[in-house]
Image (spheres, grey):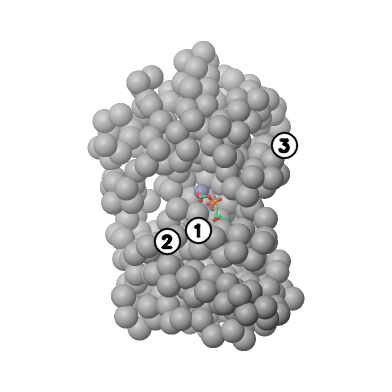
Amino acid sequence: METVNERKKEPIILGIETSCDETAAAVVCGRKILSDEIASSASVQALYGGVVPEIASRAHTDAIAEVVQEAIKKAGITYADIDAVAVTYGAGLLGALLVGVSFAKAFAYAIGKPLIAVNHIRGHLAAAYLDEPSLKPPFVTLLASGGHTAILYSPSETEFELLGSTLDDAAGEAFDKVARVLGLKYPGGPNIERAAKDGKPIIPMPKMLKGGGGYHFSYSGLKTAVINYCHTKEQKGEEYSKADVAASFQSAAIDVLVEKTTAAALEKGVKTITVGGGVAANTYLRERLKEKCDRLGLHLVLPQKRYCTDNAAMIASEGVIRYQRGEFADLSLNAKASIPLSVTLQTPQANNGKEK
Ligand code: KG4
Ligand code: ZN
């Protein structure tokens, strides 16, 4: 069996993620996941129909020490084996982020190891390296989460060209809002997916900037159309199939992502597509994208669903990239509630390890 010292050729990074309702810690060695722990307050949040920031912060405070200890224990390492502590410092809920950032700063200081500041979205992008350790840029990435929807071109591990993004709502946000209208519980995405299994995509939906808009997206028209459809039916006292609405919305929301991502890969002349973000856990999206990539001879890197939604292994994975570049943060690191996508995708100078 491989010993910790043999593994040492690659950095061992402890990742910590608390940007929303998941308290997560993971240990990776290079691109290999040694442990991956998640405690979620989603079931409590579901009672309120969405994430209540104060509840999320309190749940993180309760869970973080144990989640980190479990991750270290399950990785079979000691504190001395850890090369650096990588933590999500933004974007997300401020109070939630602060729990992770404060814990990571104290922990890194206590064990005498460097701190790495990780942007949550860069973490989602770095999840692909865990799924396929031999993955090398260039590739095109579909990023689809609760806050972002974008197509990116990566010529290297640290460079990103934004090819297109949403002009209004993010795809995940549209899933969550439509779920609420259909009376489905938080989190909306997986519940729409479940409801759609019993339905057919037979309800006409507005066109999704298909030909136009380059690689941009717009979800607000689709969301409004679904809301209007349901309200009109209810006002007229007419029955309608929630499963058909879910299936029709899902295919309209996803087909455009598949179409534009593959078109971008062809235009850029790259052979590989990667995905990241919670919406990439959607089975319909995964199947459609796989079919299309197979047809076009493109290689698809599809991280396991667990590594598409929020997790700490992806934060540790981005931590590895920064560790190798010597991009460390200091103890002045603070949490940031919002970070524009343009800043997220900049390659930081080796200043404080964070985007300015
Ligand atoms: O990446 P993520 O876990 O958190 C953010 O960084 O936002 O993404 C959460 C989003 C939510 O909007 C959620 O409804 C959506 O991803 N999502 C899904 C699925 N699983 C999560 N959307 C569609 N289908 C899913 N299976
Ligand atoms: Zn996320």
Residue 219 visible? The answer is yes
- Tell me what residue is drawn at x 52 percent, y 33 percent: 96
Gap in Å between the C-alphas at discs 3 and 2?
A: 49 Å
Rendering quarter of residue 332: top left
Q: Are marks 1 and 2 in contact (CB under 8 Å)?
A: yes
Residue pointed to by mark 1: 173
- Tell me what residue is drawn at x 31 percent, y 75 percent: 214
Gap in Å between the C-alphas at discs 3 and 1?
A: 45 Å
Q: Is residue 83 above or below residue 37?
A: above
Q: Amino acid at mark 3?
A: Met
Residue pointed to by mark 3: 1
- Tell me what residue is drawn at x 51 percent, y 81 percent: 205
Q: Position of residue 263 (x, y in %)?
A: 39, 77
User: How would you rate the neighbour count of disc 1 (Cα within 10 Å): few for under 14, some for 14-19, many for 20 or more?
Assistant: many
Give the SS element for disc 3: loop
Image position of 32 (left or right of 324): right
Give the SS element for disc 2: loop
Q: Position of residue 328 (x, y in %)?
A: 36, 29
Image position of 101 (left or right of 246): left
Residue pointed to by mark 2: 169
Q: Position of residue 353 (x, y in %)?
A: 33, 33
- Tell me what residue is drawn at x 63 percent, y 31 percent: 59
Q: Are marks 3 and 2 in contact (CB under 8 Å)?
A: no
Q: Position of residue 101 (x, y in %)?
A: 47, 27
Q: Nearer the viewer, residue 267 or 148?
A: 148
Q: Is residue 41 above or below residue 292?
A: above
Gap in Å between the C-alphas at discs 1 and 2?
A: 6 Å
- Direction right: furthest residue: 198
Residue 318 visible? The answer is no
